[in-house]
Image: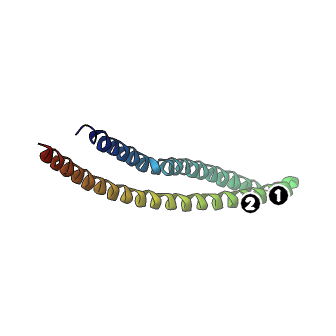
Amino acid sequence: MSADEPDWRQSIVNRLRERSRNESRGKEIILQNNRLIDQASQLTEDNLKLHVENEKLRTALSTGGGKDATGAQLAIAALEKKLLAQQEELTELHKRKGENSQMIVDLSLIVEQQKKLIAEKDKMCELVVNFYFRCMH
């Protein structure tokens, strides 16, 4: 009886360790998703600031910027280019956020399936142990 006891206990300990490893697998995806949310917020804020600055330059240009009109037009063009680049980056971040969200959902389903499987195996293991002890007595 005591010779087999450590084997099944060690087996249970190993299963619990494997379950912990499997459950923590999605942690990095969640952290990356949170970073993407922060980046998206920052880009949205920067985007708004660029829009405001762009409108100020347009207003200055339309009210007769005089000899600085060419400089203002160049500044507007540069800001528009920067704005477009940030909008593209924001779009890419939203795409990655969506992909990560889907991965989280998929991993959650896998974790639930694994939990059910472990529960079934634990129940089976308990039945085997009980049967073993009944046979020994």
What residue appears at the point 50 percent right and 58 percent down from the top-left corner?
A: 100
What residue appears at the point 33 percent right and 56 percent down from the top-left corner?
A: 112
Relative to 72, residue 20 above or below: above
Q: CA distance from mark 2 to mark 1?
A: 11 Å
Whichever of labels 2 and 1 marks the residue nearer the N terminus, that label is 1
User: Which secondary structure, mark 1?
Assistant: helix
Q: Position of residue 56 (x, y in %)?
A: 70, 52
What residue appears at the point 81 percent right and 59 percent down from the top-left corner?
A: 73
Instruction: Locate residue 83 relative to residue 14 in the image: left or right.
Output: right
The quarter of the rendered structure image containing the N terminus is: top left
Q: Which residue in the structure is indicated by mark 1?
A: 74
What residue appears at the point 30 percent right and 41 percent down from the top-left corner?
A: 9
Q: Closer to the camera, 28 or 58? A: 28
The part of the image, by quadrant, that contains residue 133 is top left
CB atoms of marks 2 and 1 within 8 Å: no
Looking at the image, the residue that sits furthest to the top is: 2
Give the label on residue 25, or none: none
Q: Position of residue 137 (x, y in %)?
A: 11, 42
Total marks in image? 2
Q: Position of residue 129 (x, y in %)?
A: 20, 47
Q: Indicate the amino acid at tag 2.
A: Lys
Give the label on residue 81, or none: 2
Q: Closer to the camera, 66 or 72? A: 72
Q: Residues within 10 Å of mark 1 (few under 14, many from 20)?
A: few
Q: Closer to the camera, 37 or 121? A: 121
Relative to 136, residue 61 above or below: below
Q: Indicate the amino acid at tag 1.
A: Leu
